[in-house]
Image (cartoon, rainbow, N blue to C red):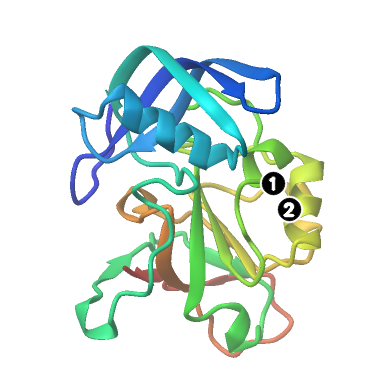
Amino acid sequence: MITAMDAQQFRAEFDARVEFSNGGHLAVAGFRVDVPSADVSADQVATLFVRSLGLLMSEHVDVTALRVLAEAHKGTRGGPSAPNPATPADERRLVDLSTAGTTITGGALALDRVADLPAVVVRTLGAGARAVGVGSLAPFDVGGRAVLFHTGEENPHLTADGARWLADHDAALVGLDGAAPPVLLATGLPVVEHLTGLDRLPPHGARFTAAPPRLTGVGNTPVRAFAAV
């Protein structure tokens, strides 16, 4: 079931076999990519599939068992929600992401860690995954960005390896639509908890802000979080 977005979005599920010009092949089953419309063709899906994996020397792609689902985009590389040049400021709109319980860890955080950050949305809602690990994060460029987890869970589960990966790859801030797991808080990254409205953000291109008051010696601080899209 598609979430509430500004316009209906679609993903394609399919099986595929890729033959390479230098020999060998790659076969997948039940693969999914973001697609621009419900009437996408097998040839268009094949192109998106090859582009999403960055496959070189692909000579022939056979797509079968194709079906299109009404589902929010997850940010397929080279797909319809891939990063584009920034929208002019006067054409952007603000999306309120706060609830009464939205807080940020830390105290007097530097503004460049919490304000006007480029955002990526890691959308695991409906994926059926028990935990978010490195495999779910590796496709994203998180350096200097706010990494926002749209999980639909009150207590999202991030693996210890996934938390370390975010810190090692210089994420500026992490936001979640539930409570932060201890492994994430242990990284020392600024963490914003209990966000709402993440279904209204694209996978890439939004600018995120969650600036707390200038307080020191505090743990969780109430914060007004929003994004410009």
User: Residue at the top extreme?
Assistant: 65
Q: Which mark is residue 94?
A: none
Q: Nearer the viewer, residue 182 or 65?
A: 65
Spatial CA distance of label 1 from label 2 is 6 Å
Residue under label 1: 181
Residue under label 2: 184
Q: Residue at x 58, y 48 (%)?
A: 179
| 159 is higher (above) or lower (below) than 185 | above
Q: Residue at x 37, y 51 (%)?
A: 81
| 1 is higher (above) or lower (below) than 210 | above
Tell me where residue 108 sits by quadrant: bottom right
| 96 is higher (above) or lower (below) than 210 | above
Q: Nearer the viewer, residue 163 or 44?
A: 44
- Is residue 212 in sight in this rendering? yes
Q: Position of residue 109 (x, y in %)?
A: 65, 83
Q: Residue at x 28, y 38 (%)?
A: 3
| 151 is higher (above) or lower (below) than 102 | above
